[in-house]
Image (spheres, rainbow, N blue to C red):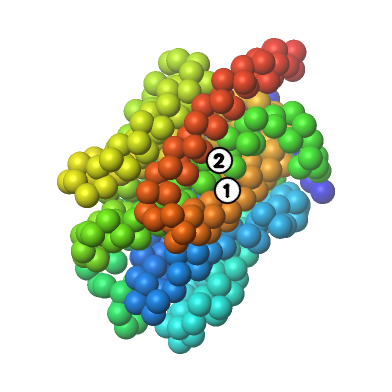
Amino acid sequence: MRWIPDVSTIWSFVRTEGRPRYYLALLLISNVCASASWGILTPTIITNCLNRGSSTLVIGILTSIWALPFLIAAPIYARIVGRVSAKPALLVGMSADVLCVWLFPLLPYDWAWVVLQIISGATLGHFSLITEAWLNLFSSERSRAQVTSLYGILPAIGYALGAGIYALVGYQGYAPYLAASAAMAIGILPILMMPKEAADIVLGGEERLRHAFGRAPLLLTIALLAGVLEMVPWSLMQVYAIDNKWSVRAAAFALPVFYWGQVLLTYPIGWIADRRPIRNVLLGTSAGAVLCMASLALLARSPALWVVVFLSGGIATATYTLGLAILGQRFDARTLVSANAAFIACYGAGTILGPPAVGALMDRLGPNALPTALGSVSACIFLCASAARLEWQRRETARAEL
């Protein structure tokens, strides 16, 4: 495997050429389009499943199973990124997803949709890995949290746009699938604009994922919990609103409100984190999440529900982006891709396990199982961040010695 150049070489390249930032901008634009596609497809899946009588457990599986391929094959994706040019890998994966979306209306069965979600997740498993590794490699220490927050905002904008398009085109017929595939196809264009030399920037080395677990176990635990905190509302907030007597049309706006919370609140939280210890900011957001979940249970049938959903969106995304910023501080350039693969794998585990587990609890205990479960997850994030002070301080000492 080819190895990434040393840190001084990278920064010299960035300052003299600026090309990696250009590549990153193209990837982020592409990510917005891909996120818009998912923002259309996910509520379409949910509503069609509700109409044909699928259980909340099945809906939770369908909306989270896409992360399973990366969770199983994270080391393989890390090696692919280190050995193969990113451009053809992204083009093939996104093109395959465009075609995959068209199979959903042709095979309107739960089991078939589970298979299609797994295929879609496998073709795009390397997308976030490439984007997040570049994000951390080419951001400065003084602006890292703001840069990672922008990374959280741009996909959220895509989700919000996609959910808004879904509200316009509806869930019946071929229209939502056409819109979802078109959004993904548009996202291919920025990748096509990447020059050939983009493939010459190699990310990462051969360090095994287990090394990352040994060096930052609490950080990776937070990644897993962040996956639950973000994916459960993505998968089940619409169901939660319907179960609390909101109309199907009103419930369709649960996701756009959640997404706009991500868009408008994530960057201010990142701005604060670049001026205060990131761990302290994470403690504050997790405590805020506990309060939001308590309010969600109490205000489920009040218009104030939308305020709580909005706040929850910003906190959920900030949990992931703050963890991503800590990851960039904790690992150097040679180990960042492997560490990022472990981080995404843990996040993916949370996205896979969270929605089915909470969906099953909602089937058994009622809709308030959702805020109760997410409040417990938020409390666990608070405890992990509290206990992680020494773990993250040791990394700061190590960085000073490099």
Is 11 drawn above or below residue 171 in the view shown?
above
Is 184 drawn above or below residue 99 in the view shown?
above
Residue 310, percent from left and from top: 29, 42
Residue for point 48% across, 18% down: 280
Residue type at mark 2 is: Leu
* Element carrying mark 2: helix
Residue for point 45% across, 69% down: 55
**Residue that label 1 marks:** 350
Residue type at mark 1 is: Gly
Q: Are marks 2 and 1 in contact (CB under 8 Å)?
A: yes
Is 170 drawn above or below residue 402 in the view shown?
below
Q: Which of the marked residues, 2 or 1, is nearer the chain's N terminus?
A: 2
Report the residue that reaches farthest toward the bottom: 106
Query: Is residue 194 shown left or right of residue 219?
Result: left
How packed mark 1 is, by other alpha carbons closer than 10 Å (few <14, some 14-19, many 20 or more), is many
The label number, if any, that marks residue 276 in the structure image: none
Depth check, front residue: 225 or 57: 57
Depth check, front residue: 136 or 177: 177
- Residue 129 seen anywhere in this rendered image of the structure: no
Depth check, front residue: 232 or 31: 232
Depth check, front residue: 393 or 53: 53
Residue 346, percent from left and from top: 63, 45
Mark 2 and mark 1: span between their CA atoms?
6 Å
Quadrant for the C terminus in the image: top right
- How many discs appear? 2
**Residue that label 2 marks:** 225
Report the residue that reaches farthest toward the left: 303
Residue for point 68% across, 20% down: 391
Residue 351, percent from left and from top: 54, 52
Query: Is residue 246 shown left or right of residue 134?
Result: left
Residue for point 62% across, 21% down: 387
